Amino acid sequence: ALVQNSQMFTASGLTPNTTYSFQVAAVNSSDDVGPYSSPLDINTVPPTIDAVGNVKVEVLNETAVAVMWDAVQSDEEVSKYTVYYSQSSGSKRQQNDGSRDFPADATSGVIGGLVTGVEYQFQVTMTLLFNGVEFEGNRSLVDSDSTVTPAYPPQVTVHPV
């Protein structure tokens, strides 16, 4: 960009968490360009993405749960929400750990294929789109509302009166 009679230039519309290289050269009144300065590499800061809050999990049956969360308000375009699930530390790890993406307008989703009787922890992230590049936020906190154990329905015995 050509900046006249100035010692300052502001670059806007840059992508977060990206390196840009800048050089400066003088131009005289005859439009002759002098030598360019050495490149100066500048890193833009990563975007600040609020963590998803109020994550709650409800057991639907012995192998599936519904995960619910509050939508996060953002000035940038929300690309998707991702639900991460993992077996709690006391369980056999990594057999059914995974994640599932949900659309940007979702505030809940169903996760199936879980192992009956195994405790799982669930976390949710929001991914934003900045200039065509996706950036994922921090995972939500794990607490008692986001930790469940899918189990068979309780057995009910009916006794005649």
Image: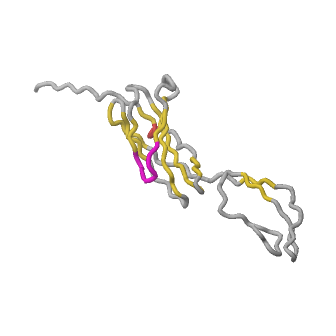
Q: Residue at x 50, y 58 (%)?
A: 73
> With respect to residue 36, does 27 lie above or below?
below
Q: Residue at x 35, y 28 (%)?
A: 151
- In the rendered image, residue 86, in percent from the top left (x then y), is placed at 49, 32
Indicate left or right for 154 with 27 as reference: left
Q: Look at the image and tell me in which quarter the C terminus lies.
A: top left
Farthest-out residue, bottom:
29
Q: Which residues are magenta?
A: 101-108
Tell me where residue 153 sits by quadrant: top left
**Front-most of residues 117 and 110:** 110
Indicate left or right for 5 with 72 as reference: right
**Front-most of residues 46 and 87:** 46
Indicate left or right for 55 with 44 as reference: left
> With respect to residue 58, does 95 lie above or below?
above
- In the rendered image, residue 142, in percent from the top left (x then y), is placed at 51, 39
Q: Residue at x 47, y 41 (%)?
A: 83
**Front-most of residues 40 and 150:** 40
In the rendered image, residue 104 lying in the magenta stretch gets the answer yes
> With respect to residue 50, does 110 lie above or below?
above
Q: Look at the image and tell me in which quarter the N terminus lies.
A: bottom right
In the rendered image, residue 138 lying in the magenta stretch gets the answer no
